[in-house]
Structures are given as structure tokens and as C-alpha cells.
Amino acid sequence: MKLFKLSIKNIKKSFKDYAIYFFTLILGVSIFYLFNSIDSQTAMMNITESTREIIDLMINMLSGVSVFVSFVLGFLIIYASRFLMKRRHKEFGIYMTLGMGKGQISKILLFETILIGCVSLVVGSGIGILLSQLMSVFVANMFEVDMTEFTFVFSSSALIKTIIYFGIMYVLVMIFNTIQVGKCKLIDLLYANKKSEKVHMKNPWVCTIVFILGAGLLGYAYYLVTAGVNQIQDPGDIFPPIIMGVVSTFLIIWSLSGLILKIVMSMKGLYYKGLNSFTLRQISSKINTTVFSMGMICLMLFITICVLSSSLSLKNSLTKNLKELAPVDIELSKTVDMPDSYMEDYGYTQEEIDASHYTVMETLERIGFDADKKLKDVVDIYTYANSELTVRTLLGSAYDQVYQTYPHLYYDSAEEFIKISDYNKVARSYGHETYELEDDEYMIVADFDSWISIHNLALKQGVAIEVGGKTLTPKYSECKNGFIRISSNHINAGIFVLPDNIDFTGFDKKNFVIGNYNAVDKEGKQQIENELTSEENYQTLSNQHLNLSASSKISIYEASVGLGALVTFIGLYLGIIFLMSSAAILALKELSESTDNKERFLMLRKLGVDEKMIHRALFRQIAIFFLFPLLLAIIHSYFGIQFANYLLAGMGIDGLLESIIMTAIFLICIYGGYFLITYFCSKSIISHKE
């Protein structure tokens, strides 16, 4: 009982100086509960079956991510315990001097860990439960579902999972603390605070060579993910620049930790100004002894910035494009009039050959769907393709220039053609601009930025094409914005719009039917869509070999919102945990150093240094310590975001600026918040005059 009371007294005494440790534990518990309770938050929502499937997938993925998050938080808790143990060396030495054995000290730490764990679990879970109510509103708003039946939500499964995961972490902390106490020697404990951490001056020439090597390796990695990005064609190709980036990060931090102090010491005016010499030696000492930690923090911050920026960009782009890129309710397509000889050569049966000649409307009639009654604003058009008219052949003289920039594109894919009258029907239906062409002119409509730049090279050179026995020249020197297929992204790589008098005999022919559901509200449209996409109709299409493709505004919307929600939640989950862990490790290190350096600051006071100078020196010391890994992470992120932008642009997604601003806000609030708390706590610690 006495040991238990002593444990409570120790926690009360340590709470003020090490509030960040308790705050981080509580924040970790609340975030863990929050993201694992989404299944309970969405259970009450009135959503469609397809949306439910998307949410179930998201929940399963978040559960998998939670395992990884638990390892990160476990590392953070053990890392924090290490510094807390270091701070209390003198306290443990006094206990042993008074006759307390190591076993009793271990029991004190055991009681403290249990108490801290219980408090953090209770408070963190309480905050998580409250925040989960706001999360319910956020999820409902994201999926645009009815919240009129909203009730208070409590997830027992999320709470149990949180208790189990964090219980395991605290058990590991207990084992770690017991091992640490067992290794302690009385003499080391009593004089731990008297030992001055030596600043090992590294050989400046070795540091310079290592820095040049690291910078060169990092520069080449940056080149591979930006200017040389076309060399990355397979998923495995991204690993070499990643490995080079990781290795070079540690090399740069190791070399700079030895060079910074040496360089500044040579600048006498700066080094001996105010308390700069004291501050810089303190910083150099810490960076020297935390190269691995600083490297890991830098990489975690880099991952945080890139993950948050990319995930928020993907979500914003997917949702904002829906009205523009899916302006009608339904788009149906079917290949028709493919040459019988071609199909016979590929082993198609006569029944399949006959079925291939049905148009979209005829196919709908065969499955019993009354298009005249269920659809309105119908547009019926055709597109054409020929295996001899490929990307390579239609680029003409621009091919060599395009190939140098994009050597790995598939240039033998057939291009797609449409008559000007058919395209104008679609354009009017979508609210796009219509065009006119002379009998010897052609134009290209596209909305995929990368392919627009490719086609523009040929258009600007006035490349002539030959289609249906006629030679055509471009009417415009650049692509015009437009598309036929509805989607959530800008995916139209280019459709050639030709005059109506072109003979497309022998071309593969595809029939499109575009229109709206004949309903006045969302429920009515959903009912028609359910009828069209029913399992019965699917079986009929399959049994009669009727290959009908369909894209609807409802399905595109649900898929887009679901994917946006998925990447947003995972991005926020990982981003916040990584950001919190990075800041907490730096904060705990600084607080531990402030405790160890109380006597040094006391000595400065005895030498006549006023409090303002001391506090200014402390602020600069902590600021530089926090900024050092962040600046390198920001440099990494600049190139990493460019690579992410390249990948997102490849999917027809753009708009990273808004997400970068949001990421900066997260960074300032969480990372900057930890910095300010660390400064004020450290200021409180060194102000204790013992």
C-alpha cells in the first residue's frame, strides 16, 4: 500500500513537467478509438447496398491500418518511457540509498504504469466517444445520407480493441522498465545529472565527404521521381529511389551534426554573440546523439506531408468533378457490326456473332427494359475504330518527338473516331460547345492533360491524317475540351471528330445511348437503376451473350465518394499518428534535456545572465531542434508531391494546392502545438531554482 501511495505521489509530481507524455497517451487512445468506431457510426445510416459495401471495405482497411498504428504508438510509448526513466535516475538512486531494492522500485513503476494506463484509457476513450459523434456527422456528410434518426453512438468493439491494443503496449512498457531498473547501478543513478554529455567533434573532412555523398545520392533520387519519372514504369521501379532517399537522409543528418558546430565556431562574431555558443553546443550535442531518431522523424514527417496532401487532393478532385464529368444519369455502350470473319477467327459462336449486331436499344428490349418509358433526353450515337489507325500512325511527324518524352506508351492502340453530328448531339446533352467542320478538316476533343499535350504536338505541326480514303487536316492547333463517356475523372485521352461524309465501312463500330432517368426525385432514379442493373437482367445478358456496358451517375458518385472517403480516413489516420509521434518524440527529448540541464541554466543565472536571454536561448534551441528534421522533410516532400502529382495526373486527377494548404494547417496546429507546449514546459522546468 505504501508503494502504491508513493506511485500516486510520483505521478502527481511528474504530471506538470511531463504533461506532453500524458497528453500524447490520451490523444493516441482517442484517435485509435475514433477511427475504429466508424462501423458503429455508419450502422444507423440509411445507405444503399453498394455504399454499405464501400464502407465495409473502408472499415476492414482501417482495421488493418490500426495494427500498423499500434506498432507506431507502441514504439512511441516505449521511447517516451526511456526518457522518463532517465529523468528519474537520481530519484531511484535515493530510493536505493534508503534501502529500497530494485524489486520494490520495479513495483513502483508497475503501479505507475497501471495508473497512467487506466487514466489514459478512461480519459482518451471518453474523448474518443465524444469525438466519434462529430465523426458520425462528418461521415454522413461525406456520403450525403439522412441523419434525421441520429442517436448517440457507442462502439463496444472499438473500445475493446482499444483496451486490448493499449493494454499490450503498457505490458511491454512494464517489462521494459523492469529490465532498465535491473541494469541500474547506484553510482550511476546518483551522479546521472552531474555527467555532462560530451560533444564528440567529428572529423570535418569525413563529414564533408559523407555530406557530398548523401546530397549526391539524394539529388539522383529526386531526379528519378521528377525529371526522370518516365523511367519508372513498374511498381518495383519506385523502390530504388526510396532506398536512396532513406539512406541519404541519415547520411545528411549524420554529416550535418558534425559540420554545423564546426562551421558556426569558425564564425566568431556569430558564435560568441549572446548565448549562441551555449545554444549551438547544446543543439549539436543532441543531434549528435539522436541521428537515428532525427532521421526517422524526418522520414515520418515526409510521409505525413505526402500522405495528407495526396489523400486530400484525391478526395477533393473526385468529388468536385462529379457534376462536370457525369452530367447525365446513364451511359450505355455496346460494340456492334464487328466483322463476322474477325469474330469467327477468334472462335466466337454463331449465337454470339448474331448477338453482337444488336444495338443498345435492341439489347434493352431483349431484356425487357422499356427504354422509351424509363429514359428521357436520349442521345443515340456511334464511334468507330480501326486497328490500322493507331496512336503511332496518327501522330505522323510528331511521333519521334513524343516518343522521346514518353518512350513507354502503348503506341499501337487504335484511336477512336466520331462524326461531327453525333459529337454535337452529345455536346448539347452535356452542355458543351458545339463545332462545325469542313469536308477536309478534323479536330480532337480530350480532357486528359497528358494526352492533350501529346495530341497538341501533332496538331500544331498540322499533321494530316487519312481516314476512309480522305485526307484531313486539323481545323484547330490544339485539342478542344470534351468527352463522351461519363466518369469521375478526366480520362478522355482523345477522340477524333470527323466530317459526316467519312466512310467508316470496315471499322469496328460502337453504339452509345446517353440519357436521363424518367423520374423526378432521387428515389425514383434509384428504382429505375435497380431495375436496369438487376441480377435477373445480368443473367439474361449473360445467357444471350449480350455484352452491354453501363455507367451511371449514381454508381460513379458512390464509387467516387467511397474512394474519397477511404483515402481521406486512411490518410488522416496515418498522417495524424505520424505527425503526433514525431512531435512527441522531439518534445520528450527536449523535456528530458531541460531536466538534465537545469544546473547549467542555474549556472548561467549565477554568471549574471538575465531571464529574457535564457528564455530566448531556450526558445531558439527548441525551435532549431524542431525545425531541423522538418526542413529536410519539406525538401523531400517538394519532390515527393511532384511525383504524387504525376501519379494523380495519370488518373486524370489534379488540384494539390488546396490539399497542401490543408496539410500545412495540420502541420502548424499539431507540430507547432507540440513545439509551443514543449517550450513552456521546458521554461517551467529550468525555472525551478533548487
Image (tube, helix red, strand yellow):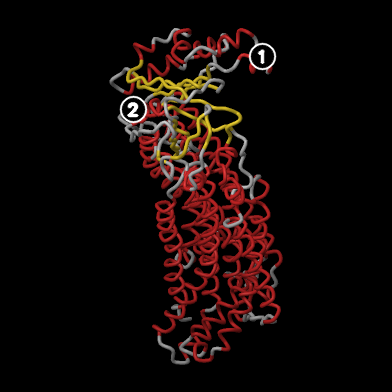
Q: Position of residue 74 (x, y in %)?
A: 59, 53
Q: Nearer the viewer, residue 638 or 324?
A: 324
Residue at the disc numbered 2: 429
Q: Position of residue 581 (x, y in %)?
A: 53, 57
For the N terminus, which image quadrant?
A: bottom right
Q: Is residue 350 left or right of residue 514?
A: right
Q: CA distance from mark 1 to mark 2?
A: 37 Å
Q: Earlier in the sequence, mark 1 or mark 2?
A: 1
Q: Label 1 is placed on what type of residue?
A: Glu
Residue 112 showing in the rendered view: no
Residue 585 showing in the rendered view: yes
Q: Label 2 is placed on what type of residue?
A: Ser
Residue at the disc numbered 1: 344
Camera-near label (1 vs 2) is: 1
Q: Is residue 179 left or right of residue 666?
A: right
Q: Nearer the viewer, residue 622 or 554?
A: 554
Q: Position of residue 85 (x, y in %)?
A: 60, 66
Give the residue drawn at x 51%, y 61%. Answer: 584
| In the rendered image, the vertical position of residue 536 relative to residue 163, given as above or below | above
Q: In terms of image quadrants, where is residue 198?
A: bottom right
Q: Residues within 10 Å of mark 1 (few under 14, many from 20)?
A: few
| In the rendered image, the vertical position of residue 310 relative to residue 549, given as above or below | below
- Helix, strand or loop under label 1: helix
| In the rendered image, the vertical position of residue 307 relative to residue 390, given as above or below | below
